Amino acid sequence: MIKTAVLGYGTVGSGVAKVFDVNKDAIAGRIGDTVEVKYILDLREFPGDPNGHKVVHDYEVILNDPEIRVIAEVMGGVEPAHTFVKKALMAGKSAVTSNKEMVALYGAELLAVAREHHVNFLFEASVGGGIPVIRPLTQALLADQFEEVTGILNGTTNYMLTKMDAEGADYDTVLKQAQDNGYAERHPEADVEGFDACRKIAILTSLVCGRQVNYEEIPTEGITKITETDFKYADALGAGIKLLGTSRMTPEGVFAKVSPVLIPESHPLYPVRDVFNAILVKGNMLGDVMFYGKGAGSEPTASAVVSDMLTCLRYEGCTLPIRWAAEAQPLADPKKFPSRFLVRVKGDPQARAEDVRALFGEVSICTPEGVEGEFAVLTREMTLGEAEEACEKLEGFAGRLFADL
Ligand code: HSE
């Protein structure tokens, strides 16, 4: 019997224990031996829980047990998670994690430590929950040059935007529902301000470029300013509003950003609803390929964590090659990002059309039913810098959205 350990018995940790329990026969068939969780590291006790007797409070117990060959870090937060994972790798144990913040910061370092100690560090669950996207990017698509990676990378905000759009539900109610379903982060600002999606696109961009992308350099807008009125404009344009993490590899450099974007019904990400995530990858030979599934929640995320643990066991003695050097990947100036924009303007469209055209050039005007005292224009393609400059000068400016229309 193979013994493993899980660090953290929260939403994902309890899911990991469940996957090992419910799927024990299928797992044994695939690995050729039964696999069991021997320890759960947590500060709390879990009286009455069937795994309560596995709980330990001292990490050294796990580290010093030669029976433990792989650990799963699902406690979240940067420290002590990072130190625990590093110590496990240095002790010759493979480690897997769902912790995007830790991976975004220390992915390159931990991969190097794993290589040095001939073990594996895998982090499939850190992006897109249960969706396999890291393995495709690092193994299945080796022949392609990537032109773009764009994804709905946060289940909480996608769930919220879906409900706000379809049901006209208010922001606080839908956030509460997402939290009750175990989708949201401990501090939901990480979801709604776009920070979680930012960590995830930083990880994907680091993997695509093979070098460290510093997430603090990625311009990030969340969904806190999205209102019912924005959805009325979206409806009038036959579009949806999605929080997208994007990186684009262009001759001008690598652009990365997180922001709400208007996308048309024909866009592959348009039908992605609720807690589902999807990552659209554009390869220069392959064209478009999309990975879709549940991006948050206990069981889907645990499925990816356990799958990584089993991969570590299957490839013991061989470190899977994942290209991610510590050297910094420079990002292109975000102000040069080209896009169309939806710009909201207070006042009467007839009276204001000339002012708007003087600043933005040719635009189409959008006046949906039920929107009073304002209108919006859809600009031609321009850079973010040009759009921001024009918005600053625009009297009655009431907001702007990226529009991939
Ligand atoms: N809070 C995250 C989300 C969890 O909603 O997507 C998965 O990373």
Image: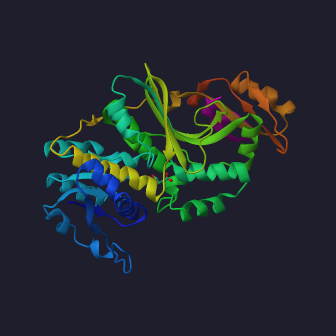
Image quadrant where residue 385 sits = top right
Please indicate, yes or no, whether residue 133 appears anywhere in the rendered image. yes
Residue 98 is covered by the magenta coloring: no
In which quadrant is the C terminus drawn? Answer: top right
Residue 17 appears left or right of 244 = left
In which quadrant is the N terminus drawn? Answer: bottom left
Give whichever of 328, 293 is nearer the camera.
293
Give whichever of 252, 10 is nearer the camera.
10
Residue 288 appears left or right of 319 = right
**Residue 376 drawn at (x, y percent):** 75, 35
Image quadrant where residue 221 sits = top right
- Residue at x-position 63% and y-position 49%: 161
Look at the picture and state if 284 lies above or below 326. above
Residue 83 appears left or right of 307 = left
Residue 391 is covered by the magenta coloring: yes
**Residue 77 drawn at (x, y percent):** 36, 59
Look at the picture and state if 46 lies above or below 88. below
Give the magenta range: 387-405
- Residue at x-position 59% and y-position 28%: 339
- Residue at x-position 60% and y-position 64%: 176
**Residue 59 drawn at (x, y percent):** 22, 67
Please indicate, yes or no, whether residue 220 appears anywhere in the rendered image. no
Look at the picture and state if 301 lies above or below 258. below
Image quadrant where residue 76 sits = bottom left
- Residue at x-position 45% and y-position 53%: 300
